[in-house]
Amino acid sequence: SGACALITMGNLKRILILGSAGRMSSGTARDLLATYSHSIEKLIIADSSNERLDILRESLTDSRIETNVIDVTDRQIILSLLAKCDVYINAVPTFAGLQMDIFHACFEAERITWITEAWAGITAIFGLGADPGLSNILCRVVADRLDRIDKMSLYWAAKFIGDENPILIPPYNLSTVLAEYGNLSQQFLNGKLQQVPAQSGFETIDLPEPFGKTSFIHSEHSEPLTVPFANAFKEKGIQEFTWKLSLPEREHQAWIRLVKAGFGETFDEDVTLPNGTSVRPVDVLQVVIDRNIERHKKRIPDQELHEIHFSIG
């Protein structure tokens, strides 16, 4: 749900979104082209999936759009696209592991030659989504109201209103969900980062409707690695900062069971099938989930999704 913008030049009229056909980034594209947005001359949307790009093209009929089907590991293609833009928005999933490669391509596109000037002239803004993004702003709002901070907790919850959905639909990138449920996470405890078990830190909070009593767990997220180290928090003596997640109960149980079945911390490590073929469990699961959604899309009910972000300090 987070994103990163790399601003490379002074004129901000041409924008590139890499990984632009995903759920989060397609919304970014719509916002940039909307009448309430600042005027832009060109929006370059690039993704590895032609199918997803086709869907996005159909929904965005705007002459300012340029679309590209690309291999995000091809440095020369990335450089050629960066040469066309003033602002680059990175929406490639975190678990693709390409963030630093893309950042260095941005540096190369600016032709920075002196090591001591490696960051000069380039501004990178991290976490432009909901979590991280709005969550960090919430924490700062709380911090500004406190003279001293001993402890701060950040929470995100989602709840569906409507008929129960018999089809499992990932709320965001599948690798991200599996990591949140299967990986150890780092939380800021007793003044330092510490690893805690997956799905630990169980806590129930009574929230306003439509949420009611809501249960939360620790999960892997970036805020504990950044927020307590910012001056606004560090200077006020913060000793504990945690992040907790709550997905709708039936979906929550489904992800727990998938982790129990082996789609946990090793979801992206190859396994060998009896016929000798090597596959990543997450790739198999993604194909199965996509097929199930397509086959049974008529069974998917209309639901209202409610989300809440809040911080307690």
Image (cartoon, grey):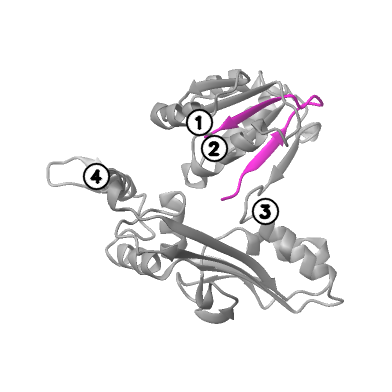
Q: Secondary structure at mark 3?
A: loop
Give the mark, 2 or 3, whose residue is nearer the N terminus: 2
Q: CA distance from mark 2 to mark 1?
A: 10 Å
Q: Nearer the viewer, residue 23 or 10?
A: 23
Judged left or right of residue 7, residue 31 is: left
Q: Nearer the viewer, residue 287 or 29?
A: 29
Q: Secondary structure at mark 4?
A: helix
Q: Residue at x 43, y 32 (%)?
A: 52
Give the label, 3 or 1, closer to the camera: 1
Q: Which residue is mark 2?
A: 26
Q: Secondary structure at mark 1?
A: helix
Instruction: Indicate the amino acid at tag 1.
Output: Ser
Give the mark, 2 or 1, whose residue is nearer the N terminus: 2
Instruction: Indicate the amino acid at tag 4.
Output: Arg
Are the residues tagged 3 and 1 within 8 Å (C-beta)? no
Q: Which residue is mark 1?
A: 59
